[in-house]
Amino acid sequence: MRKQLNIQHNISLKPYNTFGIDVLAKSFIAVSSVEELKDVFTLAEYDTKFILGGGSNMLLTKNVDALVVKVDLKGKEILSEANNTSFVKVNAGENWHEFVLWTLENNLGGAENLSLIPGNVGTAPIQNIGAYGVELKDIFHSCEALNTETLALETFSLEACQFGYRDSFFKRNKGKYIITAVTFNLTNKTHQLNISYGAIEAELKAQDITTPTIKDVSNAVISIRKSKLPDPKELGNSGSFFKNPVVSTQQFDVLIKNHPNMPHYVVSDSEVKIPAGWLIEQCGFKGKRFGDAGVHKNQALVLVNYDQASGAEIWDLALKIQQTVQEKFNITIEPEVNVY
Ligand code: EPU
């Protein structure tokens, strides 16, 4: 017999978003199977749905006047193992970092640089999570997603996902699909480590590790992240609040004349990426606190909720930062998080 849908009303979303913003959901349901998810979409009385994964990439500025659907699909399995490749299928509601730890226990390589990123497996492809020289797309094989109009499960290949920097087909087509499971492509014998990112090299050197394992790389990433990024369990935050802006080479030539120390990465012949954290720090915001909203002391790209900040207060701070960066550098920085 089908499980009865357990819809609750006027539920605080504070435990469900890593910023720790206390807003109410008009209605709320946690779904633990694809069948249940489909059933939710047949409910005529709840015409607007708000899909929630790990709640790690959103800023809630008001009560959610919709049915909040928390995707709680659990489970992971190794589908096949051959020729140094293991295909691993993971359901959307699994916690991302627990999945990474599980890959290490099973000697599966590829996800180690993505250690300690908050959020769930099913939301990771939406913004193509990335850190320390690796992006989700590098280990992604395919995913299954529920088409919210036809209620059919569809499979998306790597190409179909159109991954870009913190971007994907799913990000550009909000509300059309809900990712239910992701299949990864991991190495199981010889691992190709990606340790060229300066901070990883330095951390491994500091620990006297010359021939690192995937576990060593993961540990290095964990210690770098812990030193720079606040733990959402201790201090509400959503990771990088802004994306790193990309400017034209012409604009960059002018900027670097005026700011010779500006860090930058060449993206292509015509574009250069500039770390938003540096721009924000130059504007004097690093470590600043305005009521309970603030800019993290170790990484200016991260906005924090000291305890009781409202989403609107954090958003006001974000706008103030955006405007100051615009005035000082003539660069527009765009939020990375989803603002509701
Ligand atoms: N910087 C500053 N001041 C700051 C922060 C950074 O001057 O307050 C400078 C650093 O000195 C460095 C440069 O900016 O020269 C880059 O800093 P970092 O290595 O910390 O990386 P990031 O560009 O600020 C990105 C990702 C992070 C990811 C790191 C490491 C985005 C928006 N953010 O940050 O991702 O962990 O690289 O790969 O691309 C996230 O998306 O939530 C996230 C934390």
Image (spheres, helix red, strand yellow):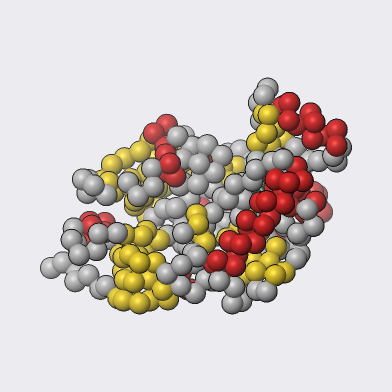
Instruction: Give the vertical position of 338 relative to 274 (above or below).
Output: below
Residue 168 position in % (x across, y down):
46, 40
| Image-quadrant location for residue 197 | top right
Residue 204 position in % (x across, y down):
76, 50
Residue 21 position in % (x across, y down):
52, 71
Describe residue 135's horizontal placement relative to residue 177 as left or right: right
* Closer to the camera in the image, 285 or 323: 323
- Residue furthest left in the image: 1
Residue 134 position in % (x across, y down):
60, 42
Residue at x 33%, y 65% (from the top left corner): 66
Describe residue 60's horizontal placement relative to residue 157 as left or right: right
Describe residue 25's horizontal placement relative to residue 168 as left or right: left
Quadrant of the rendering where the N terminus is positioned: bottom left
Instruction: Give the vertical position of 136 relative to 252 (above or below).
Output: below
Residue at x 70%, y 45% (from the top left corner): 326
Q: Is residue 268 something that shows in the picture? A: yes
* Closer to the camera in the image, 157 or 8: 8
* Closer to the camera in the image, 221 or 216: 221
Q: Is residue 185 something that shows in the picture? A: no
* Closer to the camera in the image, 223 or 179: 179
Residue at x 49%, y 64% (from the top left corner): 60
Q: How many marks?
A: 0
